């Protein structure tokens, strides 16, 4: 969220609040994004390599495909109400 004042009014970044989505084919791959003051983003790998399968419908994958580790870090850039992933 972004605002000119701490008290708002607040607007979601990119119009939706979504800055770094999971790939469409891996919707539960990473969660728990955290952005530092330096705009470095850290996440946590949940389930990887599911190939579009839902772990709730395929419980045998819950342990086999659970990551439980930090995701690779990346940086974002902010300009007004827009955020985008940048490469270093």
Image (cartoon, helix red, strand yellow):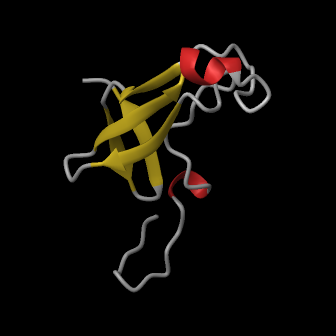
Q: Position of residue 58 (x, y in %)?
A: 75, 22
Residue 29 location, x and y as percent? 55, 28
Residue 48 at least partly seen? no
Say whether residue 28 is visible: yes
In the shown orientation, is residue 43 left or right of residue 30? left
Q: Which residue is at the front of the view, 64 or 82?
A: 64
- Write the residue at 36% across / 27% down: 69
Percent across and percent down for residue 53 are 75, 20
Q: In which image quadrant can residue 71 be found?
A: top left
Work out which residue is located at the far left of the displayed protein and give it.
38
Report the front residue among 54 and 27: 54
> In the drawing, does residue 9 fall left or right of residue 33?
right
In-front residue for pair 79/29? 29
Left or right relative to 45: residue 73:
left
Quarter holding residue 54: top right
Whole-percent x and y of residue 19? 50, 44
Q: Residue at x 43, y 39 (%)?
A: 84
Front in this rendered view, residue 63 or 7: 63
Q: Across the whole image, how many numbered discs are drawn on residues?
A: 0
Residue at 41% x, 44% y: name it.
Answer: 33
64 versus 11 height, above or below: above
Query: What residue is rendered at 31% in x and 24% in y?
Result: 87
Residue 69 in the image: above or below residue 18: above
Quadrant placement of the C terminus = top left
Q: Residue furthest right?
A: 57
């Amino acid at each position: 969220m972004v605002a000119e004042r701490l008290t708002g009014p607040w607007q979601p970044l990119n119009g939706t609040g979504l800055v770094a989505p999971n790939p469409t084919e891996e919707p539960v791959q990473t969660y728990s994004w955290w952005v530092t003051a330096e705009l470095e983003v850290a996440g946590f790998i949940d389930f990887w390599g599911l190939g579009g399968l839902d772990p709730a419908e395929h419980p045998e994958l819950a342990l086999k495909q659970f990551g439980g580790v930090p995701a690779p870090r990346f940086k974002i850039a902010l300009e007004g109400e827009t955020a985008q992933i940048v490469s270093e």
